[in-house]
Amino acid sequence: MHLTTSPMAIPPPALPRLIRSALGAGLLLFAAACAHTDDPLVKPLLALNELQYDAGVLMTKAEDLYDKQEYDQAATEYERFLELHPVHRWAPHAQFKLALCYAYRMGKVGRDPTMAEKAKAAFERVLSYSGTRYEEVARAKLAEINRYLAQADLSVGRYYFKQGRYPAAIERFRRVADQKLGGTVSEDAAYWLAVAYERDGQTAQAADAARALLDAFPQSRYAKSIERLRARIAAGAS
């Protein structure tokens, strides 16, 4: 997702590549070694050394990488900007673009959720900046990521269920159900939670979960299965 940005929200155009390339490791080390000299030949190198911390240079590099869809490297540069300039007026922009870098690198549901968890935390930090123009999009992206992570938990929970590891499955299903995200993901979690409780011999909890499912989703596609589950519980209690 590439959002239109006002001219004042991002830094000026990139420095000429010749200047940027001059910020090589050798020059920087030499400049650092001469940090206390007044030699006029060294002063330009010291200026170049200082440029590596300049907000405009850092942001320009990050934006260039982002535009090239090199999100891994762009994320590194946005992180560096935020580390060095946490209260800069471009900090909300850097935080938002960092979150997008993580979001673009999320894999399919069922894969490693690490990047989704990073994206979630990053978008939550976007919301810590009050009154920015990124709030609406950040909230929408957070909702998407929460559903993504919920689907991942459901997938893991069903894997545990098939393996007969019911307590582990219950933990995953309950985590999703407790979020009350609504829609199919919550309905699925509520159903599998009831079934997992029953398989684990926790019939009282299974009955409570079954009732909660039908209360939240009266027309649930699982209604018939849940009625059979409740009948089994009643028969076992008699």
Image (cartoon, rainbow, N blue to C red):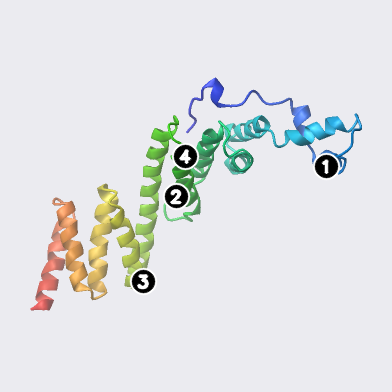
Q: What is the spatial separation of the Cα atoms under label 1 and label 2, in whole angstroms?
A: 45 Å
| Marking on residue 163 | 3
> Which is more foreground, mark 3 or mark 1?
1
User: Which quadrant holds residue 57?
Assistant: top right
* Location of residue 21 by image quarter: top right
Q: Amino acid at mark 3?
A: Gln
Characterize the local packing of mark 1: few (<14), some (14-19) or many (20 or more) Cα atoms within 10 angstroms.
Answer: some
Q: Earlier in the sequence, mark 1 or mark 4?
A: 1
Spatial separation of the CA atoms under disc 3 and disc 2: 22 Å
N-terminal label among 1 and 2: 1
In the rendered structure, find residue 32 and report the number of the disc placed on it: 1
Q: Secondary structure at mark 4?
A: helix
Mark 4 surroundings within 10 Å by alpha-carbon count, few (fewer than 14), some (14 through 19), many (20 or more)? many
Residue under numbered circle 4: 126
Question: Three-letter amino acid code at disc 4?
Answer: Val
Rounded to the nearest angstrom, the CA distance separating label 3 from label 4 is 40 Å
At mark 3, the secondary structure is loop
Q: Position of residue 58 (x, y in %)?
A: 66, 35
| Up/down of 141 relative to 118, above or below | above
Secondary element type, mark 1:
helix
Q: Are marks 1 and 4 in contact (CB under 8 Å)?
A: no
Residue at mark 2: 108
Please tell me how crowded label 2 is: few (under 14), some (14-19), or many (20+) other residues with Cα within 10 Å: few
The amino acid marked with disc number 2 is Lys
